């Protein structure tokens, strides 16, 4: 049975925790709004990019000599997994879910006899995967110093990946990130970026464009940008998801702290009352004994 | 036929402009191109240069650092990696762009060095257009 003093200390400590989680929740909410806005702002570019790529791919894709970024290397034995997670914790299952999806995929590929290479973006995913998949790590991108994600960040990651592709280090690259569906739901997703998965428009109803310079040249110039755009979109989605997950995790924590405070207060009052009653009984029985 | 078309200038981070334009002058890699309503559909790569938009509200100019444009009869969409309005382009930003292009040239593979050198020249030419 804890003493009254212990209970009192406990209540104060939980109250302090609640203040912190409440503050973190509000910070996450503010950041979430900003993250959503930037994800929204990036959408027109990504949409246009994929529209143009798809019309180009329809025109060039099936012909001989299509760029390797589109056609692939013709094999899929070396798989690069780019695992994008948050730099911080305290966000519920956000990081764990992405890591879990990546781990499942890596184990599947290993079971099929494929070679797996892992590039981590964000500290938490790296920590989560290090123990059982650490020997497959080939690099890490640290974004913890980045205050605001810009296209340049995505460009750097894309350059790294494309450099490795040109050097023949892998055949297929997949990014793992979380799609922001709502504050309470973030869906971990795997998306193949190399070779580019482009929906070709088979209906042939789209406008027939002239290309200047040739369609091959434009496609070759556009594909790396498509990769960077996909990574940028993933980074933004991830950022929004992270803040959403953190917000709801902190909301839960705040609520739990409140419940705990109520419970502890009841216990505190009861034990105080019990002490008073005990003293009264002692006095009364003492008086009766006389 | 409509006498205006929808012009959009988007960068990966945000939409820079969206207006009804009657004429758009694009700096293509193989020479400048002026798109007017009803232009044949074309997709072209852009070199660093000045992009001019003539709309009902007047003429506005943007400095773009490459990218590409999609032109169809009713729309012109420019996807620029980096675009700033002429008013925002200061000597400092331009110097930064040139420095970036130089860095690319230094790091460039011999096979693309020519293209990188051209890009640097374009960047520098951009500065002389700006009168900054």
Image (tube, coloured by chain):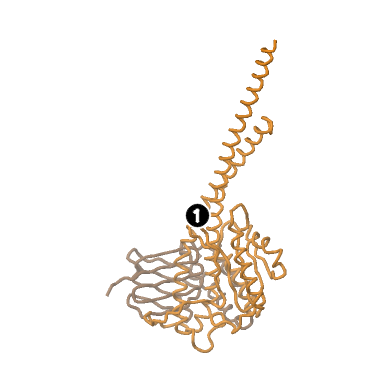
Chain colours: A orange, B brown
Question: Is A280 left, or right, of A37 in this rendering?
Answer: right
Residue at x 67% of width, y 16% of height:
A285
Q: Which residue is mark 1?
A: A183
Kindly indicate the quadrant of the structure image that contains residue B53: bottom left
Residue extending furthest bottom? A64
Q: In front here: A265 or A122?
A: A265
Q: Position of residue B131 (x, y in %)?
A: 49, 67
Q: Position of residue A210 (x, y in %)?
A: 41, 83
Taking the image as drawn, is residue A22 in sight? no
Q: Circle 1 marks a residue in which chain?
A: A
**Of helix, strand and loop, which one carries label 1?**
loop
Question: Is A53 left, or right, of A169 in this rendering?
Answer: left
Residue at x 32% of width, y 65% of height:
B56
Residue extending furthest top? A290
Q: In front here: A283 or A28?
A: A283
Q: Position of residue B61 (x, y in %)?
A: 43, 67
Q: In the picture, which quadrant includes the N terminus of chain A?
A: top right
Kindly indicate the quadrant of the structure image that contains residue A155: bottom right
Residue extending furthest left? B1
Residue at x 58% of width, y 33% of height:
A266
Q: Position of residue A192 (x, y in %)?
A: 55, 73
Q: In the picture, which quadrant includes the C terminus of chain A?
A: top right
Residue A3 vertical position relative to residue B87 in the rendered view, above or below? above
Taking the image as drawn, is residue A59 in sight? yes
Answer few, some or many: residues within 10 Å of disc 1's Cα (few below 14, many 20 plus, some between 14 and 19). Answer: some
Residue A14 vertical position relative to residue A120 in the rendered view, above or below? above
């Amino acid at each position: 049975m804890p003493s009254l003093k212990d209970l009192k200390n406990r209540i104060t400590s939980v109250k302090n925790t609640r203040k912190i989680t409440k503050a973190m929740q509000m910070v996450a909410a503010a950041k979430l709004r900003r993250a959503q806005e930037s994800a929204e702002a990036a959408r027109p570019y990504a949409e246009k990019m994929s529209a143009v790529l798809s019309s180009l791919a329809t025109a060039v894709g099936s012909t001989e000599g299509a760029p390797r970024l589109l056609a692939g290397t013709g094999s899929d034995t070396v798989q690069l997994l780019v695992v994008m997670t948050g730099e911080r914790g305290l966000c519920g299952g956000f990081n764990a879910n992405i890591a879990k999806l990546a781990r499942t995929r890596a184990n599947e590929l290993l079971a099929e006899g494929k070679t797996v290479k892992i590039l981590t973006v964000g500290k938490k995913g790296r920590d989560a995967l290090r123990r059982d998949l650490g020997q497959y790590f080939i690099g890490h991108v640290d974004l913890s110093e980045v205050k605001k994600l810009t296209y340049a960040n995505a460009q750097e990651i894309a350059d790294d990946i494309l450099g490795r592709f040109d050097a023949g280090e892998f055949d297929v690259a997949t990014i793992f990130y979380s799609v922001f569906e709502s504050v309470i739901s973030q869906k971990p997703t795997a998306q193949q970026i190399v070779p580019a998965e482009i929906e070709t428009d088979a209906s042939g109803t789209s406008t027939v464009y002239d290309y200047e310079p040739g369609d091959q040249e434009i496609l070759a110039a556009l594909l790396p940008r498509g990769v960077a755009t996909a990574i940028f979109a993933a980074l933004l989605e991830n950022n929004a998801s992270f803040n959403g997950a953190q917000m709801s995790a902190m909301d839960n924590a705040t609520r739990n702290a409140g419940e705990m405070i109520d419970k502890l207060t009841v216990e505190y009052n009861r034990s105080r009352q019990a002490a008073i009653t005990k003293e009264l009984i002692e006095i009364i029985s003492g008086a009766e004994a006389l | 036929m409509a006498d205006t078309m929808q012009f959009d200038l988007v960068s990966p981070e945000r939409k820079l402009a969206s207006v009804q334009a009657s004429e758009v002058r694009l700096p293509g890699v193989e020479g400048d191109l002026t798109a007017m309503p009803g232009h044949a559909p074309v997709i072209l790569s852009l070199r660093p240069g000045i992009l001019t938009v003539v709309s009902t509200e007047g003429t506005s100019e943007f400095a773009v650092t490459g990218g590409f444009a999609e032109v169809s009869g009713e729309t012109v969409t420019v996807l620029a990696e980096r675009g700033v309005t002429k008013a925002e382009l200061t000597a400092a930003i331009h110097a930064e762009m040139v420095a970036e292009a130089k860095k690319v040239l230094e790091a460039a593979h011999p096979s693309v060095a020519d293209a990188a050198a051209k890009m640097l020249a374009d960047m520098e030419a951009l500065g002389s257009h700006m009168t900054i």
